[in-house]
């Protein structure tokens, strides 16, 4: 069965990688970029770069206009409406750190922060270190055997001491949607703040932060076919006043004296220093491109590819999948074969997949694994990419067994 | 400085290897010939960090000549380590300091194994060897 991608030619790097005999299946790490984004970056740099929110001159006005247009496009992409603000940061990790520092004052000794057992280090370490700073307790919500946050256990662990719930929408290792509505209801029932790490989730399908009802939603641009060095925080209006200013300098200030200063409200008050202007403009172009696609067709394509991937893996002997991947990716180990050996031989054959702990060491340890191989898909992948992967996998296993 | 006999043998087979498959088979053969490391040596203090796999490296100067022993639970890194030991074992302290190890792997046609993004651990092994060699 052939599963061609009608969008493949929109991403020039895919053809370039193919000329280097490389098959790119590491999309959960970062994605290739559409021509529309490359054109927007070129246009910005070729037609007059300028800093934003500062200068009265024409290039500054153009840059600021384009920059703020991107903010509106992100708000539209998440259907934020006027329910909250879009804050630009330097990445998803930086966005989660902004929240962990900006909300630090909310926590007192003995207060609890609930995260899940599958969190990426970016949604684990900022909260872990916050807990250390404030004498708070980090509570880990366990997973069920399908790799989903166990709701019965969560109901027992999220309680009156919970000040904040921070969970991923879609695991970067297990590839399964987490039961966010139920978890967010629990958080709300206990007046806990809620943070959703949408780094993987935002890439697949459209998400509505108003319908979701979380206080904060975080994602990174580069995983969503956008430029790197850019993260996004959606912050709901009700929750926003609880976030204190974190990084200082640049145009986040309202009024400064030598000994004191007052700061701007969101979003600018949380965007210290010169923001990644080109990346913000580029993300706007990416979102325009994505908005022009038939979203149902994209989802159907991704689902068909994923099905093909899972069936191919399941058809081979000795392969153990981690969890029950529903979409986007699959992580696996092979009985009697070291990940490092398999990764080595896949690399030799031009297959770009990820091997290792995937920035989720505690999760891998819970599977009693030091690492796993992860194949992750994007809308430009096709069944031939997967065929090449399976051929390389079979060759590698034949050599190793 | 003449090459150790093992190193000459390695150069001979690896320089004549055609394609990734043959190189991989050779690496596994060399890895399989690496003597097992005693459990006493497989301790945390001898573990090389920064590898996907577990790699242990021990070394001592015996009568003025370096004798290293190493092993790994992964087969290809074990082969790479065997090629490393073939080049350095028996060298004096000053000879070891003079060896260009990245160049050694380049001669074997394995320089890609040392690219900075590789997490196979060969870079970490070389670094540990430098630390041991002082």
Image: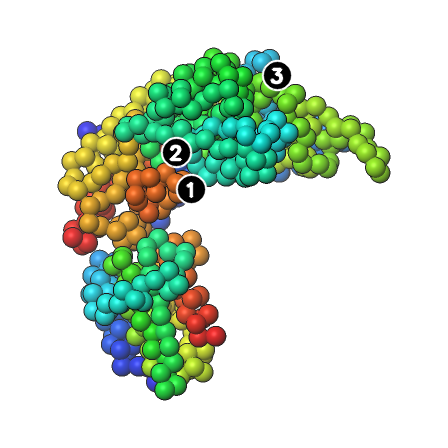
**Residue at 73% across, 32% down:** A251
Q: Nearer the viewer, residue A254 or B60?
A: B60
Q: Is residue A124 above or below residue B118?
A: above
Q: Which residue is mark 1?
A: A359
Q: Secondary structure at mark 3?
A: loop
Residue in the foreground of this view, choosing between B23 and B81: B81
Tell me, yes or no, if residue A197 can be seen here.
yes
- Badge 2 element: loop
Q: In the picture, residue B129 is in which quadrant?
A: bottom left
Residue B77 picture location, percent across and down: 30, 60
Q: Which residue is mark 2?
A: A118
Could you tell whether A173 is left or right of A137 in the image?
A: left
Which residue shows up at 42% across the image and 53% down it?
A: B117
Nearest the viewer among A161 and A36 is: A161
Q: Residues within 10 Å of mark 2 (few under 14, many from 20)?
A: many
Q: Are marks 3 and 2 on the same chain?
A: yes
Quadrant in the picture for the N terminus of chain A: top left
Quarter of the figure with residue A400: bottom left
Residue at 81 percent of width and 29 percent of height: A255
**Mark 3 or 2, nearer chain start:** 2
Frontmost of labels 3 and 2 is 2
Note whether B94 is above or below A360 in the view shown.
below
Q: Are marks 2 and 1 on the same chain?
A: yes
Q: Which mark is residue A237?
A: 3
Badge 1: few (under 14), some or many (20 or more) residues near its Cα, within 10 Å?
A: some
Does B111 sit above or below residue A287?
Answer: below
Picture coordinates of residue A164, whole percent (x, y): 52, 25
The answer to whether marks 3 and 2 mark residues whose Cβ atoms lie closer than 8 Å is no
| Badge 2: chain ID | A
Nearest to viewer (mark 2 / mark 1):
2
């Amino acid at each position: 069965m052939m599963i061609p991608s009608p969008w493949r030619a929109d991403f020039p790097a895919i053809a370039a990688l193919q000329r280097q005999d490389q098959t790119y299946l590491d999309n959960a790490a970062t994605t290739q970029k559409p021509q529309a984004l490359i054109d927007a970056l070129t246009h910005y740099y070729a037609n007059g770069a300028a800093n934003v929110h500062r200068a009265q001159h024409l290039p500054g006005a153009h840059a600021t206009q384009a920059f703020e247009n991107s903010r509106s496009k992100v708000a539209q992409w998440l259907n934020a409406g006027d329910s909250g603000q879009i804050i630009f940061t330097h990445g998803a990790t930086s966005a989660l750190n902004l929240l962990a520092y900006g909300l630090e004052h909310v926590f007192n000794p003995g207060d609890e922060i609930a995260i899940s057992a599958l969190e990426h280090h970016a949604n684990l370490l900022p909260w872990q270190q916050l807990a250390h700073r404030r004498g708070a307790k980090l509570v880990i919500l366990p997973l069920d055997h399908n790799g989903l946050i166990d709701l019965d256990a969560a109901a027992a662990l999220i309680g009156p001491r919970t000040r904040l719930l921070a969970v991923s929408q879609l695991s970067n290792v297990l590839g399964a949607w987490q039961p966010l509505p139920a978890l967010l209801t629990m958080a709300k029932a206990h007046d806990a703040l809620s943070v959703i790490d949408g780094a993987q989730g935002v890439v697949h399908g459209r998400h509505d932060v108003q319908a979701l009802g979380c206080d904060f939603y975080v994602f990174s641009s580069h995983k969503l076919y956008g430029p790197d060095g850019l993260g996004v925080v959606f912050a709901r209006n009700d929750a926003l006043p609880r976030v204190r200013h974190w990084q200082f300098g640049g145009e986040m200030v309202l009024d400064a004296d030598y000994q004191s200063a007052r700061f701007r409200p969101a979003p600018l008050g949380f965007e210290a220093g010169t923001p990644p202007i080109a990346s913000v403009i580029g993300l706007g172009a990416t979102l325009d491109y994505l908005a022009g696609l038939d979203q149902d067709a994209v989802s159907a394509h991704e689902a068909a590819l994923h099905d093909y991937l899972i069936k191919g893996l399941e058809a081979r002997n000795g392969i153990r999948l981690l969890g029950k991947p529903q979409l986007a990716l699959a992580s696996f180990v092979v009985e009697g074969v070291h990940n490092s050996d398999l990764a080595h031989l896949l690399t030799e054959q031009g297959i770009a997949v990820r091997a290792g702990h995937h920035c989720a060491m505690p999760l891998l340890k819970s599977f009693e694994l030091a690492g796993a191989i992860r194949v992750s898909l994007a809308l430009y992948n096709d069944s031939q990419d997967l065929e090449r992967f399976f051929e390389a996998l079979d060759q590698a296993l034949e050599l190793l067994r | 400085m003449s090459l150790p006999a093992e190193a000459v043998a390695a150069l001979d087979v690896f320089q004549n290897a055609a394609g990734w498959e043959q190189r991989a088979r050779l690496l596994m053969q060399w890895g399989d010939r690496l003597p097992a490391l005693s459990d006493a040596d497989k301790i945390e203090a001898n573990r090389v960090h920064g590898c996907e796999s577990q790699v242990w490296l021990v070394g001592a100067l015996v009568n003025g000549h370096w004798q290293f022993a190493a092993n790994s639970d992964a087969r290809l890194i074990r082969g790479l380590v065997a090629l490393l030991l073939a080049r350095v074992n028996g060298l004096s302290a000053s000879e070891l300091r003079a060896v260009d190890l990245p160049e050694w792997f380049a001669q074997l046609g394995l320089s890609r194994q040392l690219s900075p993004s590789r997490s196979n651990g060969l870079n970490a092994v070389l670094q540990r060897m430098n630390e041991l060699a002082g």
